[in-house]
Amino acid sequence: MDAPDFPATLEWLNTDRPLSLKDLRGKVVLLDFWTYCCINCIHIIPDLKRLEARYPNELVVIGVHSAKFQNEKDVENIRNAILRYEIEHPVINDKDFLVWNAYGAQAWPTLVLIDPAGKYVGYVSGEGHYELLDRTINRLIQEFGDRKLLNRKPMKFVLEKEGRPKSVLSYPGKIVADEASERLFFTDSNHNRVIVTSLNGAVQTVIGDGNIGLKDGSFATARFFRPQGLTYDAKQDLLYVADTENHAVRRVDLKAGTVTTLAGNGKQAMYPPVGGVGRQVALSSPWDLVLIGNTLYVAMAGTHQLWAIDVTTGKAAPYAGTGAENIVDGPLNRALLAQPSGIATDGRVLFFADSEVSAVRTADLSRSGEVKTLIGQGLFEFGDIDGAYPQARLQHPIGVAYHQGYVYVADTYNHKIKRVDPKTRVVQTVIGTGKRGMNDGKGKQASLNEPNGLVFAKGRWFIADTNNHLIRVYDPEKDEVTTLRLTGIEKLAQKSIPGFIGKEQRVAEQQIAPTASRLLLLIQLPGGTKFTPGAPFRVQAVSDQPESVTVGKFSIAEPTDMLAIPITPRQGKATITVNLSVNYCATDNTGLCYFKEVRLVVPVQVSPEGSSNPMVTCELR
């Protein structure tokens, strides 16, 4: 039968135009029905990327984002999910389930194949279908290729990431602190590293080289893959890291400056999860962890469980939850959990954020104990309601922290920090308006954007404000939210000239006089931003024909919007290439900083009628 086409009213992302199945005729089309909260949807992204790489000219993947949570219907939030998971195919915002219903989808994720003639082929749901999809796509390509009905012309899409500056932090995940040494540790998740700063934001150490990988070694050479949770062992000066998309737990020796793998073989555990030892065990999206004695308790989001890992032996095994997804209290080995993503303790019980059921729950620290629910009702029961259980509601919380008798919750999809009293089961908003934003100010007037982690240290709360790419600070005595301004950000620069990663800009040919001694370069920053004194600012200029126009040596003490590049014109034509590596920050929030590299190509011709004071403009937009 003919596959249903896409309604004309839908919002599209990762493309500069809406698409129809007619536009895709001659291609094998794979529809991915997903929602960005769903761990199973996250798990199949690598399979989609493998298929796209294997069939770059014959296959087009279309993401159909059919939201579970209200917050996920917002197109800007979907855009952030696309950027976070580095999705490079078009995505539809199917917020009203029009495409979902047309194809009869019933679960996330569901994958539907459409052949090059626009006919419906079939579907699969859940994870683990790469081989089946690969075989079927390969068969369709052969069949329609033989019939001369295959379009092998590559399709290019304008992606959301194009033209965007790189933020100094990228989707920071979780955060912990050591009060004694006044240090903060947080995962700079999409930069695949861990950052250590002072409580005032001075960058001290960067752990990981920023590239994706599962590699042990020194801080400068080790590699992670979108790490999330952290816990700190003050006695040993060790940091344990939930290396989420490597499906591993790493150990960071802060004295020795090394990273090793405690548990995880880099492969996702399949159902049923069984446990194992060290580098031989398979884990599944560990999202957060907490250390009690010699035991790491892990929020294992991918298997809907809590796990326990012995840090001396590396032995890892399920601790609570059967692996089935739901909200059912009871004995540890019979309870049902739903994507636990944050974990903390008061030393007597474990508190965990059970994200998919919008719940905060507890697990006893005795193997004979139970799982109990403080707040939360079910897989589709969520909202933003303060008050007592059972009326109180959260929306996909991801982080929890314990402080002075209360559980503080990163109520992620409500863009709030809330407080839960474990005795009365009463929920109260502390920070946030309920709408995404980036405003400092009084607690309930300030705004966050999908916060993921939080920690209390030296009288203040430090919050990983994930979609804002910031660390925020809350002073409860003043009821004031501010933004942590990072200093020493030159230590965070991942790449710089000559390792150019920027976008090329070309200007019209410039007529320059033989008497010209400099080429003026005006740098235009995006609106609402400014250079920050002391931030890295590097410029390199070269001429491809130095016998025609020579570029002299120069240095820059401070960032500036007007550069004078020394030149010596002689005769003829040349091309001057200027590579810029620039850091700049928001005018009204110097904690929000960006990094961008641009290559400016300037063709020049020496002419008596030319300008003796030539000037070109570089736009950092």
Image: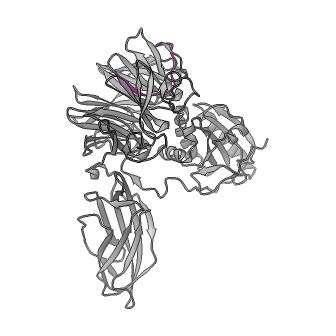
Q: In the figure, 557 relative to 203: above or below? A: below
Q: At 40% across and 48% down in the image, what residue appears? A: 439
Judging from the image, the colouring scheme is one colour
Q: At which x and y percent is residue 517?
A: 28, 82
Q: At 47% across and 58% down in the image, what residue appears? A: 163
Which quarter of the figure is the N terminus placed in? top right
Q: Residue 555's image quarter?
A: bottom left
Which quarter of the figure is the C terminus placed in? bottom left
Q: At 59% across and 57% down in the image, what residue appears? A: 16
Nearest to the observer: residue 63 or residue 140 = 63
Left or right of residue 119: residue 94: left
Q: At which x and y percent is residue 2?
A: 78, 44
Q: Is residue 427 visible?
A: yes
Nearest to the observer: residue 538 or residue 267 = 538
Q: In the figure, 592 relative to 508: above or below? A: above
Q: Which residue occupies the extreme top position in the image?
A: 368
Q: At 52% across and 21% down in the image, what residue appears? A: 390
Left or right of residue 507: residue 114: right
Q: Which residue occupies the extreme bottom position in the image?
A: 608
Q: Which residues are magenta?
A: 331-345
Nearest to the observer: residue 68 or residue 141 = 68
Q: At which x and y percent is residue 587?
A: 36, 58
| Residue 259 within the segment the image draws in magenta | no
How many marks are shown on the rendered structure?
Answer: 0
Q: Is residue 546 visible?
A: no
Q: Which residue occupies the extreme right position in the image?
A: 1
Q: In the figure, 358 relative to 141: above or below? A: above
Q: Residue 566's image quarter?
A: bottom left
Q: At which x and y percent is residue 111?
A: 64, 37
Left or right of residue 108: residue 318: left
